[in-house]
Image (spheres, rainbow, N blue to C red):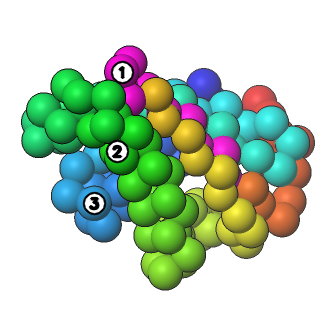
Amino acid sequence: MNKYEAEFSNVVRAFRKKHMGKGPGRINTTFCKNWAICELEGNLSPVEKFIAEEENGRQMLRAARTEMVKNIYRRNRPYEMEELLGCNFVDLFVDIDIEQDKGMSIFIFDENLEDKFSQ
């Protein structure tokens, strides 16, 4: 992970903490073409872990977590990311495995991040 990928991870953590009350425990970011791919671990709060003990709870959490995260970015443009990268945020794809407490977020930008920030 280069320094821009590491800083991007910090921005993601801060953004989620600000808008969701808790950020992931660990984030690993990789730039690939115009994508910033984030692997996230330690996403769930203690209450969410309790809810996840039941199958219905896991299904509800997965649906809520994926849609909620996308909606947060739609309502609150991630200017901090755009400023760090010097390009515009376009879209976001999100998924989470509730049982493993691991998620993936793929941020799409309007420039090739891999070329722009390769060492």
Q: Which mark is residue 99?
A: 1
Q: Is residue 45 left or right of residue 30?
A: left
Dot in front, 3 or 1: 1
Residue matched to label 3: 20
Horizontal and vertical percent position of residue 73: 51, 69
Q: Is residue 100 left or right of residue 29?
A: left
* Crowd class of label 3 (few under 14; some 14 to 19; many from 20; radius 10 Å): few
Q: Which mark is residue 76?
A: none
Is 102 colored magenta in this rendering? yes
Front residue of 62 and 35: 62
**What is the residue that sits farthest to the front in this orientation?**
56
Helix, strand or loop for the magenta stretch, by majority: strand
Residue 33 in the image: above or below residue 80: above
Q: Is residue 106 visible?
A: yes
Residue matched to label 2: 61
Q: Regarding mark 2 in the picture, which secondary structure is present there?
A: helix
Quarter of image, res 90: bottom right
Horizontal and vertical percent position of residue 116: 83, 48
Residue 104 in the image: above or below residue 86: above
Residue 72 in the image: above or below residue 105: below
Front residue of 74 and 83: 74
> Which residues make up the magenta segment?
98-107
Dot in front, 2 or 3: 2
* Crowd class of label 1 (few under 14; some 14 to 19; many from 20; radius 10 Å): few
